[in-house]
Image (cartoon, helix red, strand yellow):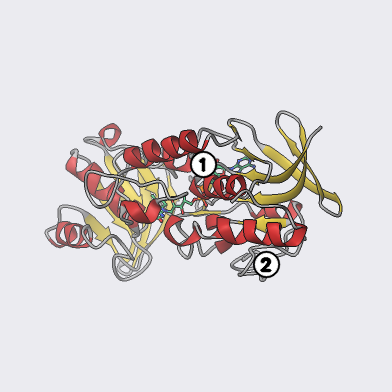
Amino acid sequence: MSKYDVLIIGGGPIGLACGIAAKKAGLSYIIIEKGALVNSLYNYPLFMTFFSTSERLEIGGVPFMSMAPKPGRQEAIEYYRRVKQFYGLQINLFEKVESVKKEGEQHFIVTTSRGQYEAKNVIVSTGFYDIPVMMNVPGEDLPKVKHYYKEPHFYAFQNVLVVGANNSAVDAALETWRRGANVTMVIRGSEIGRVKYWIKPDIENRIKEGSIKAYFNSSLKEITEKEVMIETPGGLITIPNDWVLAMTGYHPNFKMLESFGIETADNVKHCPVYHPDTMETNVPGLYLAGVVCGGMDTHIWFIENSRVHADKIVADIVAKHHYATAE
Ligand SMILES: Cc1cc2nc3c(=O)[nH]c(=O)nc-3n(C[C@H](O)[C@H](O)[C@H](O)COP(=O)(O)OP(=O)(O)OC[C@H]3O[C@@H](n4cnc5c(N)ncnc54)[C@H](O)[C@@H]3O)c2cc1C
């Protein structure tokens, strides 16, 4: 079994950025991705628009051209696929990392759904999009409850409840309402959350004119086959319902990080411990990159501000192990 200088877990934008940085430094590396290339982006809503302009999503210095300043999901997928091809990145797709064990100095054994690898260093760039934040209400396990929203046509002429008030919730509410759904939103706070500036007036005006019904300072209490019960400031109400879009967010796989030996700073936000200059965790040689770093605060890190993790990590690996760099 050959031993890689670096094994990267996750083929999202930041995992790819780590692969590029490793390649540029002349390190041997492999990226292991459990799904398709940039699997999270692949599973985003079909018509989503990034809040970032395209140049802020660039990695490896490859220009990202988009029709409008802010690209859509499809353009981003095209871009990252071309980046993979441009750099000839070594990536195994549809292979899941199941365990990471440190066996000694510069010696990790990484077990996947297909076999085992040896690596001197491991980078965990597994994102947060695989595990939804659950509402923990009766009926949440019904098939009509969706934690991922793909596209609006499916919901046309149906009673749709959208839970949440951030970008994903507002996009889902507006898109489904425009395709003829009867949309109700249930919102914990007293106003629409941090959303893209150009959709804020749209949703606020749809609510003001009554096209989309919104219950603020409210929470979903129960879901049944044909109805939902909502606790509102005016009391408990029951409304007819066909589908619940629970846009309540996602979180990193804390159990997986813990099983790798990564400590967390607290038990509420589950922020993993790492050095901000090097991104190295409490386990020497085991690094974190991308949105996985944020714990429950998934809004802190995004592509824009976490793509720098790749160079920080590779600089640390090169400095520690005195590798000769290719550039
Ligand atoms: C709807 C939406 C819109 C967004 N818009 C923006 C934006 O405009 N600008 C911006 O900068 N950011 C945005 N973000 C955030 C951004 O998409 C994420 O920050 C980005 O995907 C982070 O990249 P990442 O590589 O850290 O994680 P991800 O892209 O989530 O990649 C992690 C990868 O790891 C893989 N993986 C997980 N576990 C394993 C395992 N055990 N074995 C192997 N592979 C594994 C996953 O399949 C996934 O492909 C948005 C996020 C969402 C949800």
- State the residue in front, 112 or 156: 112
Specify whether 36 is left or right of 227: right
Q: Which residue carries the number 2 mark?
A: 273
In this rendering, does residue 242 appear at all?
no
Specify whether 216 is left or right of 18: left
Q: Residue at x 62, y 50 (%)?
A: 25
Specify whether 97 is left or right of 74: right
- State the residue in front, 228 or 209: 209
Rendered view: 229 above or below 179? below
Would you call the spot at circle 2 few (<14 residues within 10 Å), some (14-19), or many (20 or more)? Answer: some
Disc ID at residue 141: 1
Would you call the spot at circle 1 few (<14 residues within 10 Å), some (14-19), or many (20 or more)? Answer: few
Q: Residue at x 19, y 38 (%)?
A: 179
Q: Secondary structure at mark 1?
A: loop
Q: Which residue of the protein is positioned furthest toward the left in this rendering?
A: 209
First in sequence, mark 1 or 2: give its number. 1
Circles 1, 2 touching at the beta carbon (< 8 Å) = no
Rendered view: 286 above or below 100? below
